[in-house]
């Protein structure tokens, strides 16, 4: 079964105009990005304010049927990050009934790893002064997951800010015709941000969730611990059940908010990224 592109784009379009939606509850938080480089587990250098990030959550609807829109994005400041250009964004639109997803749409991208970036640059004749991204779009409905994955090269620093970068990548993504076979699952597969929010709101100190992203099945195992400050630390372990790779992230949460005050993860074994809340 094929879902119309119009239906996918209508769902994703709502993700880019959340601040203009007046109905429902909106939570948003901005972060300063710090980076720590380590060797053999020992920190060598920490540099603050190497980038910015934000998290946004919008909810609307009745008690038994709700619409959730989630967006997490961030990027480096090359002037503070020794010229490194790195950015990523993931947006989700989930229709929930009785605390279970009934339909989900997502769009996301991230700076391509070097082994994927080189072929993209060669194909675009842009070996230098270009940045490559891997972008993924998908829609989940009962019993089925649709997806599309595209590699995109953009001239370096031709975007003004994160919304402009998202718009440019969306435009190039929409112009491609690459498609992937549909995948079939029981029920409606969950998505990553939705699963993380479910873990945050769970009353259990330990919880496990399964979600689908880009045709891969993931298991998210979460543990909560109360700290002396009164905040809750959530540790999430992600297992890719296709590639067998694992990763870990940590969130620090206040009692009155679903959005973390601090986020910590390691995209590389030698690199730890910390997102610290900025007051606004």
Image (cartoon, rainbow, N blue to C red):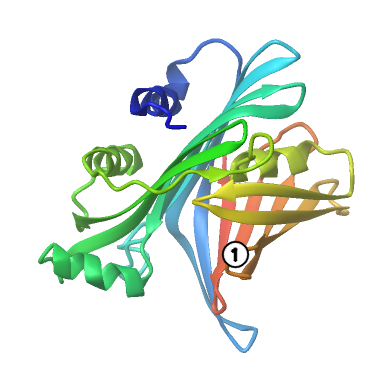
Q: Nearer the viewer, residue 253 or 156?
A: 156
Residue 11 coordinates in the image, percent (x, y)? 44, 25
Q: Position of residue 152 (x, y in %)?
A: 26, 54
1 or 94, which lies in front?
Answer: 1
Q: Is residue 22 left or right of residue 143?
A: left
* Direction from residue 25 to residue 64 in the image, left or right: right
What residue would you read off at disc 1?
A: 242
Vertical placement of 108 versus 269: above or below?
above
Image position of 32 (left or right of 116):
right
Can you name the residue that lies furthest to the left here?
125
Relative placement, left or right, of 137 versus 131 is right
Instruction: Say what secondary structure mark 1 lies in.
Output: loop
Where 94 falls versus 162 (above or below)?
Answer: above
Residue at the image point whose x is 13% and y is 62% from the top: 124
Figure quadrant of residue 126: bottom left
Q: Based on the displayed image, in which of its 4 quarters is residue 78 positioned?
A: bottom left
Residue at x 21%, y 40% (from the top left corner)? 175
Q: In this orientation, which residue lies closer to the viewer: 184 or 201?
A: 184
Q: Which residue is drawn at 61% across and 63% down?
A: 265
Q: Image quarter for residue 238? A: bottom right
* Mark 1 neighbour density, 10 Å: few (under 14) some (14–19) many (20 or more): few
Residue extending farthest to the bottom is: 40
């Amino acid at each position: 079964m094929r879902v119309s592109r119009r239906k996918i784009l209508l769902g994703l379009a709502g993700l880019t105009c959340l601040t203009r939606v007046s109905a429902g509850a909106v939570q948003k938080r901005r972060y300063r990005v710090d980076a720590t480089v380590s060797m053999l587990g020992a920190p060598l250098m920490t540099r603050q304010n190497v980038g910015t990030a934000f998290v946004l959550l919008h909810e609307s609807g009745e008690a038994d049927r709700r619409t959730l829109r989630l967006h997490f994005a961030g990027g480096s400041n090359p002037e503070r990050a020794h010229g490194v250009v790195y950015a990523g964004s993931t947006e989700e639109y989930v229709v929930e009934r009785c605390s279970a997803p009934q339909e989900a749409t997502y769009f996301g991208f991230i700076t391509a790893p070097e082994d994927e970036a080189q072929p993209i640059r060669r194909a675009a004749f842009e070996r230098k002064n270009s940045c490559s991204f891997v972008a993924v779009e998908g829609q989940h409905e009962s019993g089925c997951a649709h997806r599309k994955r595209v590699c995109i090269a953009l001239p370096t620093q031709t975007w003004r800010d994160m919304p402009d970068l998202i718009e440019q990548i969306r435009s190039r993504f929409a112009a491609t015709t690459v498609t992937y076979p549909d995948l079939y699952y029981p029920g409606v597969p969950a998505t990553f941000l939705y699963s993380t929010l479910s873990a945050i709101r769970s009353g259990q100190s330990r919880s496990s969730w399964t979600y689908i992203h880009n045709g891969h099945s993931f298991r998210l195992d979460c543990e909560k611990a109360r700290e002396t400050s009164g905040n809750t630390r959530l540790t999430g372990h992600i297992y890719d059940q296709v590639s067998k790779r694992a990763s870990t992230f940590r969130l620090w949460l206040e009692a009155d908010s679903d959005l973390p005050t601090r986020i910590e993860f390691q995209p590389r074994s030698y690199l730890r990224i910390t997102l610290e809340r900025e007051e606004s």
